[in-house]
Image: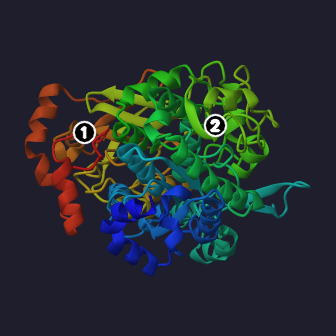
Amino acid sequence: MRSDILKEQIETLPHRALLISAGLKAEDFERERDKPFVGVANSYNNIIPGHIHLNALTEEVKRGVRDAGGVPLEWGVPGVCDGVAMFVEMRLSLPSREHIADNIEIMTLSHSLDGWVGVTNCDKITPGMLMAAGRLNLPAILLTGGPMKANVVEVEGGRAGEVKKHHPIEGFGIVGRVKSGAMTAEEAEKMLPLLACGAGSCVGLYTANTMAVATEVLGMSLTGCATTLATDPRKKQQAYETGRRIVELVREGVTPREIMTENAFENAIRVDMAMGGSTNAVLHIPAVAREAGVEIGVEMFDEISRETPNLCKIIPSGTHEMADLDRAGGVPAVLNRLKDKIKDSPTVNRDGEGDEKGNGDGNGKPKTIKKVAEEGRVLDDEVVRTLENAYFPEGGIAVLRGNIANSAVVKQTAVGREMMVHSGPAKVFYTEKALLDAIELGKIAEGDVVVLPFQGPAGAPGMPEMLTPTDAIIGAGYKRVALITDGRFSGATTGPCVGHIEMEAFNGGAIAAVQDGDTVEIDIPNRRLNVRLTDAEIEERLKSVKAKAPERSLTPLLKAYRERFAGVNCYGNFTST
């Protein structure tokens, strides 16, 4: 018998020799030991604050894999910090998402792994890993690294006990204050020590934390993972349990497409609407869904938003940070509020007896999201309000349409009541720098509608985030200035900022027809976005649309990205060719 097994294995002799050379042991290959080979895709680097602690978490994941009887095999995954990337001319952040999904596909399939863990945290890394999970359909689980904690300081000269929360993204608004003359450069520089917070994804419900929440609601991370702070000791315990759980998922044969169902995606959108997450979710969730074999259109976000009240006011839409949400019960608390609207779907959590997260000995079946919702408890009614006492009667995102947009998105819960309906003269800029210069020179007036075309996936290319101009407008003190663009926004964006306008200018979209002085009309309650031009006027102006496209030096990757999205809609198309 032993001889027969050896004969069958002889063809793998050189492969085993290579793996033993890398540190594995001969017993790791013995069939009777049933040791799954588990990949650990570690996106550690020391550039992103959300990722500087991931090596320590990865060690705990690997320890969990070993203790559960698996063999962990680690490799590195790149990660772009969107906050830093917005400072540079080459915008490779969104294209990096596809690169990450491809990276994982290459490593898992090339090395015949039985399953894998994604150790992630920030904006494009988490959706890229989710895309890989859906695409490969090998047992997988994600560990999101957790939010950072804001610096909480007493307000000088304020009321007794009055505090203010400081964090890195606040710096983008400070840029606008300096540009407008409301603050000196010296005063701004003194703020720097207060803005640095240490390890973790940025403190509010920006894209990183929005996608961590979506990951937990989709069922692809352990319950509690999204809101547990990066520096909380519980995070290392979650890492260890994640490592143990992936071995169980491999042995149970549970795959991502069984977890990331259509119901799961609807639930993720609903929770995102209730919490007021980043508009980038409208790009990422459909892309992940498509890789998992599920079609999600932009209209679903609007449909769910209309029937889902906004229950949270998390930075940048309010004053609560992710740490407050964690203290209030985390994602399960939000799910509990929405439990009558949540559709059933499995999660990576194990059902049955065990610890408070459902991990441990039990019946071996995945715990469902409805059970997570039933078990959730709200510990602060102000951080997670009731449906009857919602902050806003609808969800976070509205989808607008009109003669310059087949579709466009706005984070309506971050728009003041006075700007929900607005019309004003267009001020058109083709680069962010031109807009920032106009702010500095006082060329933007209250009531204007700033228009930034040629910022889409083909036009930019790469669809860069518009946080610098949007926060500069807010920081400059404008109260009644709107912005529309075919680019996208950071989760940090506040105010009447409308993005993702389709079709984009580079592909002949009507936003390219807008000129200085044209009246732009924004009506969020009625979901309208129009310019006061006739169809004939728009058509005539669009004849010279490409002539307006700004010249940009492009890397080979961005050239290929432009070619890929020339003539296509941005939704659901960011998938591998």
Q: Position of residue 258 (x, y in %)?
A: 47, 34
> Relative to the observer, which residue lies in front, 445 or 459?
459
- Give the residue number, with chain letter if any, for mark 1: 569
**What residue is drawn where x is 34% and y is 57%?**
109
Does residue 388 sit above or below 310 in this rendering? Answer: above
- The x, y position of residue 374, in whole percent, is 72, 26
Q: Which mark is residue 437?
A: none
* Residue drawn at point x = 78 percent, y = 44 percent: 355
Which amino acid does the dot numbered 1 rest on? Asn
The N terminus lies in quadrant: bottom left
User: Depth check: 568 or 268 in front?
Assistant: 268
Q: Which residue is mark 2?
A: 364
Looking at the image, the residue that sits furthest to the right is: 160
Q: Residues within 10 Å of mark 1 (few under 14, many from 20)?
A: some
Mark-to-mark CA distance, 1 and 2: 42 Å
The quarter holding residue 217 reads top right
Q: Secondary structure at mark 1?
A: loop
